[in-house]
Image: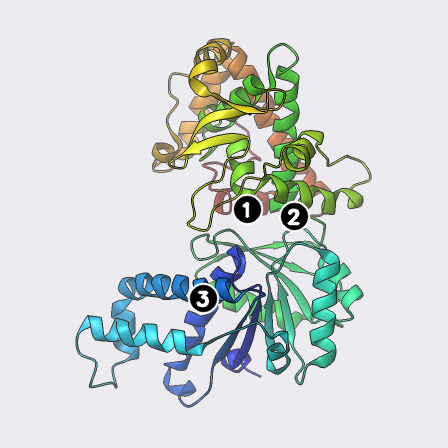
Amino acid sequence: MNYADKFTNVTVLGAAGKMGSGILLLTAMEMTDLSLKPENRGKQFVINAVDVSSDALLGLMGYVRAQVLKAAEKKVVILRELYKERSDLIENGEIIGQYIDDVMLRIRPTLNLDTAFDSTLIFEAIKEDPKLKVQILSYINKKSKTIPWFFTNTSSIPIGELDADAGLGGKILGVHFYNPPAVQRLVEIIKGENTLDDLVNFAVMYSKNLRKVVVPSNDFAGFIGNGHFMRDALYGIREAEKLAEKRTLAHGIYMVNKITQDWLIRPMGIFQLIDYVGIDVCQYIMSVMDPYLPDEELHSELLDEMVTKQGISGGQNSDGSQKDGFLKYEKNRPVAVFDVKMKQYVPFSDIENECDDALGQPPASVKPWKSVIGEADKEDYFTRFFNEMKQTGSYGAELAMNYSNRSKEIGKKLVADGVAQNQEDVNAVLLTGFYHAYGPINNYLD
């Protein structure tokens, strides 16, 4: 079966979710683009959008339509070529409208899992729960009328474990999109011990057709992305807790978040990133990874406190706005920090002067992340910046350098443990998937 034929009947499980909706959108457009090529004329391309809520599926269709419109407007020149035999489509608006219709007509929203039995390619983007994934994948595999391939979007569960427990015989591959899939350029591809090579070759071609950056990860819990992020987050949490010994936890969270964003020049501070991903999601991913890491403990009582006792989970609202987490948000900008003991948010204005005075001034050449990513020679800039930091002598510089060294240590351990194939892959994941301006494995503080 060639590349296009594999798309004749596709299913996305968890299609209305945050990740599933993006995967469905990208796949539906890839299928439509294939259908418009002369060699594929007459072939049927169907994608089943499976979820557990009819309301969520209704929202999904609206989301897909809106996103296809944006995509079509950007590639109208390409679409004009694809529709060149359609003499009835003259104006750009007509071509864009036809493309939207063609994409939408391929999508079959359904609550019925059994529709997956006819699919040869199945994307799984359901809850990050090993038992649930195994139950559903095993059920489909046993009932299938075809010999399906399974692409799982898991960000932490070993592929070999899913393969063995669901009895898939190597017909499963980790294809880990980053959030949101329609925007994020990174795709981690994780091959289990018995994964068939054909799945890997197909997934690489598919990802590159979507113009994604493909980074391979070996099959260790958490892979490269969460392997680094979870440890990086845990270090930030513990640093905040240390700072709280002389101040309050609210002070510690504010200071560590500021250090990781402003002093390390990242797109957002570590606590803002935890909020964005979801405190509950981070807590769960750590619980999945921890049993596989006998030489370290990947667990935070503070995350347990926030989720279980305080009922604060972070994440996004349905409109994409940020939910309150460690930080409180107004118009998606953090304005306050949660005090666990007081069980309320403390405005930045109440603590920022004290915290900023304690940190001191950052290096004189510091720039916002948005400015630095446009630098023509980032290597030269960061060499100078970190040299200045070493000379600063402030408390903030000490915290920032310790954090940077720990981030580098985590990255090198991922290579040493065989999670990443090389240092370049670790840096590529953090640069592309997390939008860092520089890779964690560097020589800036040597």
Whether pointer 1 and pointer 2 mark residues with C-beta atoms closer than 8 Å, the reply is yes
Mark 2 falls on what kind of element?
Answer: loop
Reply above or below: 313 against 259: below
Q: Residue at x 29, y 77 (%)?
A: 98
The label on residue 322 is: none
Which residue is the site of mark 1? 429
Residue 429: percent from the left, percent from the top? 55, 46
The amino acid type of the residue labelled 1 equals Val
The colour scheme used here is: rainbow
Q: Quickly name the residue at label 3.
A: 58
Q: Position of residue 394 (x, y in %)?
A: 51, 10
Report how far apart the C-alphas of labels 2 and 3 lie in the structure: 40 Å
Whether residue 8 sits left or right of residue 102 in the image: it is right
Q: Kindly check if marks 1 and 3 are in contact, taking CB atoms under 8 A apart as contact.
A: no
Of mark 1 and mark 2, the one earlier in the sequence is 2
For label 1, the SS is: helix
Callout 2 crowding tier (Cα within 10 Å): few <14, some 14–19, many ≥20: many
Image quadrant where residue 440 sits? top right
Frontmost of labels 1 and 2 is 1
Q: Is residue 213 above or below residue 50?
A: above
